[in-house]
Amino acid sequence: MGNINKIRNVSFLKTISLFGVVGSFFYFLHIISGRLLYKGYNPMAQAISDLTASNAPSRNTALLFSFFYGICTVIFSLGFFFYFKGKINKIITVASFSFFLMAVVSFFGYTFFPLSEAGYAGNFQDKIHVVVTVFVVAFTMIAVILFSIGFFKIKELKYLGIISLITFILLITGAILINLLPAKYFGIAERINIYSVILYTSILSVWMYKKINNERENRRLLNG
């Protein structure tokens, strides 16, 4: 009975691990569908949040895919945290929790406080949207930095440390460009930030899946 429960738990965790990739798929569906339904939308200048703004013609469809993305990312990050909690080192555990907080704040914050209209109207809803963004960026930065440090401490996982470091550099680059580039290129700078996080989430998702699968295979070989 115990072995059956272990198999079920491993299968469940393998499924959870793939939610990161599935979430990324929904994220790009929300962008693609939004652009198709939002006539005149300029991805070079406009924020991705414009696609789900309260008055955006693409809101309903883009918001639906964005909702699925948020749910999948929250589930994945929660599963990631519990699976790796105390498993590799304390730094990875803290990084995982920060990553989970990022997913939760992003999901609930952007769901309940979308932009009131494309651009920035400056009302209460828009101000809270900006506050949510600040927290999302902060938790993301903390998570990626700690992941980089934690992975570099493990010889076999240094490649993930390098990936984490590259992601951090891309986040910093995007943040700098947002402040340096003319407004007509805001969308490009923002996408450097967001796409790097989406890609990083997918990489963690695939890595978790492979790790669980390898551990399951090793147990099977040990048990004969």
Image (cartoon, rainbow, N blue to C red):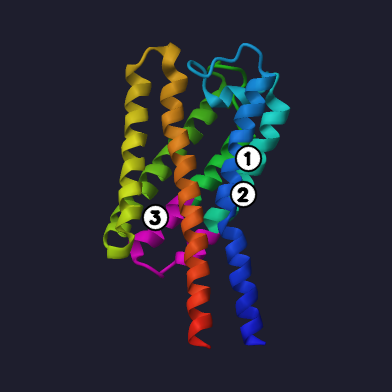
Is most of the magenta stretch helix, strand or loop? helix
Residue 173, image quadrant: top left
Percent coordinates x, y for residue 196 in the rendering = 43, 38
Which one is in front in this view, the residue at disc 3 or the one at disc 1? 1
Residue 88, image quadrant: bottom left
Which one is in front in this view, the residue at disc 2 or the one at disc 3? 2
In depth, the one of 101 and 24 nearer the eye is 24
Name the residue that disc number 2 marks: 72
Give amino acid for label 1: Phe
Q: CA distance from mark 2 to mark 1?
A: 9 Å
Where does the magenta region start and end?
Answer: 79-99
The dot on residue 95 is 3
Quick check: 123 above or below 69? Answer: above
Quick check: 95 above or below 66? Answer: below
Residue 138, image quadrant: top left
Name the residue that disc number 1 marks: 26
Pointers 2 and 1 in contact (C-beta within 8 Å): yes
Q: Secondary structure at mark 1?
A: helix
Quick check: 161 above or below 111? Answer: below
* Residue 135 appears in the figure: no
